[in-house]
Image (spheres, rainbow, N blue to C red):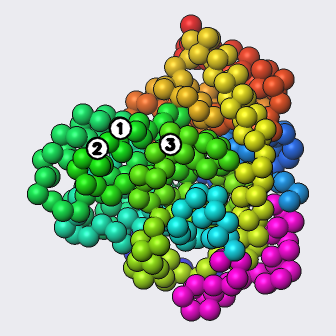
Amino acid sequence: MRQRTKSPLYQTINNELEDIAKQSLTRSLVSHKPLEKGWIRRNGKLMLNFSSNDYLGLAGHPEVKQGALQAIHDYGASASSSRLIVGSHPLYEETEQAITSWKQRDSALIVHNGYTANVGAISALASRNAVVYSDKLNHASIIDGIVLSRAKKRRYNHNDMNHLESLLKKDKDIENKIIITDSLFSMDGDFAPLEDIVTLKKHYGAFLIVDEAHSSGIYGPFGRGYSYQQKVDEEIDLFVGTCGKALGSFGAYVVADQIVIQYLVNKMRSFIFSTGLPPSVLGAIQASITLVQKDEERRRNLLQKSKLVRSILTEAGFNTCLSDSHIVPILTGDNETTLTFSSLLMEEGISAVAIRPPTVPPGEARIRLSTMAVHSDEDLISACQVIKRIGKELGVIT
Ligand code: PMP
């Protein structure tokens, strides 16, 4: 093969990769085959999966798979263009209606994924003259959306309402203020104080966006989301939700008043300039939304499993941060210990990812355990025994 002329950028890339490796921050891709009851096969080895966002175990549900197959049968494999051209097949309308009726709101728009939902909606809504207030632990897609919007960014300390209020006060002459928060923080497993945020939003006339990526499908009546559990849903101006986590599929949605959705259809670049989701995905989403609403037991199971895991691990002395949800992190501190912890767990047949900076602040690396409704209590109890033993060996607990 002829040798390509190499730009100096290759050297820069190489240096960066070496730097990442020195800090024990290298990430790599490994394939997994999902099995039943929250088990996976990785490199031929069976493992209990604590790393999935398929919290309710719907990704392999027969009705979800059938929804996808039927949609392919009826509409083919692709939307074939962006929705504003000819990609808006009838499944879109049906799915958006299913979402508005589930969320009891005016209007919804299906988009490609949670990442582009945040990037697209925030950059469309926040003009250069706006100020966006964002929790320091908000998801990367929120941060990227704010950067792209070129609005002024104010990061408030995690869940710190005094800090948020002091920032809002300083901007009293600015007309367009947008507050954005995750409802459930995916690396800490704690919730945003939505009631207090709503009080501030009302007082300071802000527009409130809540990203329910990790809570939708699980919390609140019919799994509508944490805002509904807290009974503040009517005060939320725009919800972001993904279908790639509890709904066990792919894609995402934004839910808001009709006028806001109409605006996004006209202004949201990640929506306008990209091929619509394929029919199979919409068929799967519809099936999951139906299941989530009627299968309360699945949601109860998930919370019972996470309570079990959290209580065993906190009793053993692990720091589970402020987790109060189905996401149970165990704080390990430095990157190397965390990587060793994760690989020892893998050797014992437990898949639990090492979460390191920049996903979490430096010095706060952790093992993130996400429980699934389909895990069995016996599997969880024996996995916790292994976690305790390795935690002791590594000096994470005494
Ligand atoms: N928001 C939050 C809070 C998330 O945790 C994630 C995914 N990790 C996203 C948005 C992105 O969602 P998706 O995977 O559908 O792109």
The stretch in magenta equals 64-93
The reply to whether the magenta stretch includes residue 356 is no
Q: What percent of the width, then of the height, locates residue 220? A: 60, 42
Query: Callout 3, which amino acid?
Result: Lys
Is residue 146 at least partly visible in the picture?
yes
Q: Earlier in the sequence, mark 3 or mark 2?
A: 2
Please tell me which residue is depicted at 12% across the width and 47% down the height of the picture.
170
Quadrant (top left, top right, bottom left, bottom right) of the N terminus: bottom right
Residue 200 is tagged as: 2
Q: What percent of the width, then of the height, locates residue 338? A: 55, 30
Question: What is the number of callouts on the image?
Answer: 3
Residue 196 is tagged as: 1
Q: Secondary structure at mark 2?
A: helix
Residue 231 is tagged as: 3
Query: Callout 2, which amino acid?
Result: Leu
Please tell me which residue is depicted at 45% across the width and 78% down the height of the picture.
262
Can you tell which quarter of the image residue 341 is in?
A: top right
Q: Earlier in the sequence, mark 3 or mark 1?
A: 1
Query: Callout 1, which amino acid?
Result: Asp
Q: Secondary structure at mark 3?
A: loop
